[in-house]
Amino acid sequence: QKEVEQNSGPLSVPEGAIASLNCTYSDRGSQSFFWYRQYSGKSPELIMFIYSNGDKEDGRFTAQLNKASQYVSLLIRDSQPSDSATYLCAVTPPNNDMRFGAGTRLTVKP
Amino acid sequence: NAGVTQTPKFRILKIGQSMTLQCTQDMNHNYMYWYRQDPGMGLKLIYYSVGAGITDKGEVPNGYNVSRSTTEDFPLRLELAAPSQTSVYFCASSRSRGVQADYGYTFGSGTRLTVV
């Protein structure tokens, strides 16, 4: 089992819709969870982090964490073509460095 | 404020050649990392450093070496390049590490390396 799993996509949504990106992780002791956005040919950039169960909102982005289910998600409301990118889920297991999923490629169609 | 600067951006190496990927950060971060990113495989940690003079292996260290003589610089050395080292390499730095506090990694722009 991979430490961090994401659906590779591509996920395609129309402009203005909600994009839902999902991530599961294997180490139940993990405490820190991150979402990075990576445009094609560019480096990852941090867009959200979450530590506690529940929802965390930042503008059009909402991160959701359910530690019991070992599940993290990212919702993007009012999706824009500029949101088209690969989204990387990252998890920090106990006593270890950040582990990254392979990413989900999102396409927002005008 | 430049953040994390990597050079070169692109490089083609022949099998058996060696090279050094340069990484410099100007944020006074203690923690620095080298990752490689292969298609569909996510980012894999090669080496990391918790401060000047202190480095340690990550998940995929074979074929690589690092040094950290200053807080700012964290070069990655490839000895005897092999086709399996064809990848995109990212250097990153962070203010803290592990689960101590909220943090994120700041990544450099990457080096696209091809070994032929």
Image: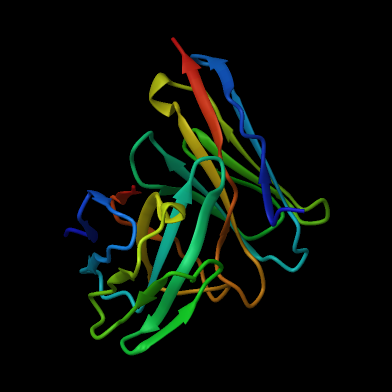
Is B64 on the left or on the right of B75, as rendered? right
Residue B91, compared with residue B13, is above or below; it is: below
Residue B33, compared with residue B84, is above or below; it is: below
The residue lying furthest to the left in this view is B1
Residue A61, compared with residue A91, is above or below; it is: above
> How are the colours assigned in the image?
rainbow
Q: Position of residue B20 (x, y in %)?
A: 25, 67
- Residue, x 48% and y 47% (percent of image)? B38
What is the quadrant of the C terminus of chain A in the image? top left
Foreground of the two, B20 or B7: B20
- Residue, x 40% and y 65% (percent of image)? B34
Foreground of the two, A89 or A14: A89
Count how many numbered circles sit on residues in the image.
0
- Residue, x 35% and y 79% (percent of image)? B30
Q: Quadrant of residue B26?
A: bottom left
Residue A90, compared with residue A38, is above or below; it is: below
Would residue A17 be visible to someone looking at this image?
A: no
Foreground of the two, B96 or A95: A95
The residue lying furthest to the bottom in this view is B53
Q: Position of residue B65 (x, y in %)?
A: 37, 76
Would residue A97 be visible to someone looking at this image?
A: yes
Q: Position of residue A7 (x, y in %)?
A: 66, 35
Q: Position of residue B87 (x, y in %)?
A: 41, 49
The residue lying furthest to the right in this view is A68
- Residue, x 24% and y 50% (percent of image)? B11
